[in-house]
Amino acid sequence: DAKTTQPPSMDCAEGRAANLPCNHSTISGNEYVYWYRQIHSQGPQYIIHGLKNNETNEMASLIITEDRKSSTLILPHATLRDTAVYYCIVRVSGGSYIPTFGRGTSLIVHP
Amino acid sequence: GAVVSQHPSWVICKSGTSVKIECRSLDFQATTMFWYRQFPKQSLMLMATSNEGSKATYEQGVEKDKFLINHASLTLSTLTVTSAHPEDSSFYICSARSGLALTSYEQYFGPGTRLTVT
């Protein structure tokens, strides 16, 4: 699986958009971009994933660059409860995948 | 979405004793389950992968005789930490994957179990 690079930490004000970047310059054509987050002392939570088109769900939006070498997770109106470590993972789809996590980005949402 | 539970949510045990952690998929059948360990301020580290009815596959550096994994049914996997020592104190997280083709890429994570060995 391709490696990802994320900033170790970010912060944003409550109510503002949080934009979390992820670089994955060695991504292959059949690899998806997945985002998870982990709130302190809890298990990881799936957020969103995409292949090449931008995606949006009730939690967030995922913007993938045209060359697919980077992506941005957008939390449109961050709340204090969004404070967590966010993991960007690049992986193939399918049952043979074994999930591994990097260090992620620690997002702190402040009042 | 699918729900994965873990029991207990936290446990304190004495050094030298064994402790069992259960991971259950509540509303789907998990053909594959994963066990992770997470030390403070670190990322999740995969310990082992288990498929229902077969022996678990352990990651390099993980002692299979110390961390016993059983995946006897499609909804239950257990991790037993044998002869626990203080350095085994960690946050243990399980993850389950459905065998259904449409959702086989989805990882559903449990809430984690905090183990403290005194």
Image: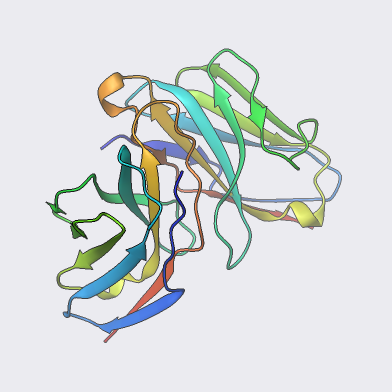
Residue at 74%, 40% in the rendered image: B62
Q: Residue furthest top?
A: B53
Asked if residue B22 shows in the view, the reply is yes
Q: Between residues B24 and A49, which one lies in front from this camera angle? A: A49
Number of numbered discs overlaid on the protein picture: 0
State which quarter of the image contains the C terminus of chain B: bottom right
Position of residue A47 measured from the top left corner of the image (x, y, whole percent)? 27, 52
Q: Is residue A10 left or right of residue B83?
A: left
In percent of the image, x 81 and y 50: which residue is there? B14
Of A6 and B23, nearer the camera is: A6
Let me know if residue A57 appears in the view: no
Q: Residue furthest right?
A: B16
Q: Percent position (x, y) of residue B8?
A: 56, 43
Q: Nearer the viewer, residue A79 or A105?
A: A105
The quarter of the picture where the N terminus of chain B appears is top left
Q: Is residue A21 above or below residue A99?
A: below
Q: Quadrant of residue B98?
A: top left
The reply, left or right, for residue B97 in relation to residue B56 is left
At x 47%, y 54%, the residue is A3
Residue B79 appears left or right of A46: right
